[in-house]
Amino acid sequence: MTRPIIDDKFGTLAAHRRRQAEEQRARYLRAQSGRQEKFVTSPRRVYELIRSGIRRGTMPHDETLSEQHLIDSLGATRNAVRKALQMLADDGVVLRARRAGTSVAHDIVAVRDGEVGPRAWAGMPDEGRLTVDTLECRRISAPAVLQNFIGAEVDSVILLEQLGRMGGKPLYLRVGYCITDFDIEEFVTRIESNHTEYPPIAVAHNRIFGTVFGGSSSVVEAISCQERAAELLDMPVGAPVLLRELITRDTAGRPSELSFTHFRADRVAIIGSSDTGSSAL
């Protein structure tokens, strides 16, 4: 006759303990949500913030990066800042020397998605810093795979290879398959007309192909740099590069060019969306 009373007592006790545990957990969660972390302790997160600052120009090239300033401005621990700076040094973005401190080795150049190269026309941040050398320009038969890529049947294209430098240092290696009936001499003249002022892509496209720029589509992949590209880009063989496939079209939707560009991954950031940007053609 006493068993139901015992069972009820233990059941009540278990329920009470469950309520206590739930209340304790609720208090913990409220405390956690209300607590603000004083310091960033993740070196990866500090790395991301510093690298973004270098790309945005808030941490200029050749200026010393003070650990204490970074700790204060980022709200980070000293250990996280030091590890992040070492990660950036491993990337080649900063230089670290005992007693001399840490300085930015080079800036990170922004190339907008859909643009051929950095924004180097008049009034833009990279004006006067970009130079482009034409390494090869000749007409070749259009292979079937190329026609499949561009979705058009063409007999021949002009193969164009260029090396772009920013501030005198190699930045990208670009191969373009240009769909045009212009002969090589005229085409080279049209290309070279853009190598003195580097106008926006809409202007460059009209000068080179004689049609109105209608837009572009692109794909970006991280790959290992092969031997010839590594030599031209002044990089170790196997170092990471950003390979971008870019197709430009006119307003009628006809393809004008298929290009493949190897960007130095330590110096270039592909950002934003396609618009009327700069061209390095």
Image (cartoon, helix red, strand yellow):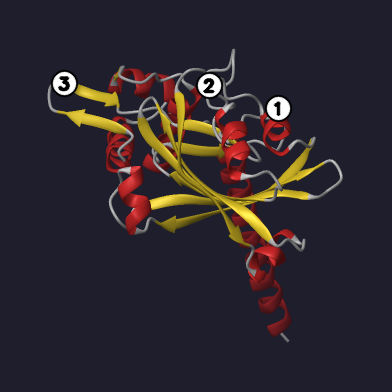
The residue at the point 70 percent across, 35 percent down is: 205
Estimate the x, y position of residue 69 in percent, counting from the top left.
34, 17
User: Who is closer to the viewer here, 213 or 87?
Assistant: 213
Nearer-N-terminus badge (2/1): 2
Distance of mark 2 from mark 3, alpha carbons?
39 Å
- Choose the circle earlier in sequence order: 3 or 1: 3
3D distance between C-alphas at marks 3 and 1? 46 Å
Q: From this viewpoint, is residue 163 visible?
A: yes
Q: Quick check: marks 2 and 3 in contact, CB under 8 Å?
A: no
Report the quarter where the N terminus lies: bottom right
| Amino acid type, mark 1 | Val
The residue that disc 1 covers is 203
Q: According to the image, label 3 marks what residue?
A: 100
Check disc 2: other Cα within 10 Å, few if <14, some if 14-19, many if 20+. few
Q: Is residue 180 left or right of residue 53?
A: right
Image coords of residue 30 (percent x, y) = 62, 40
Extreme residue in the top direction: 123
Marked residue nearer the N-terminal end (2 or 3)? 3
Element type where label 2 sits in the image: loop
- Would you name the residue on which mark 2 appears? 196
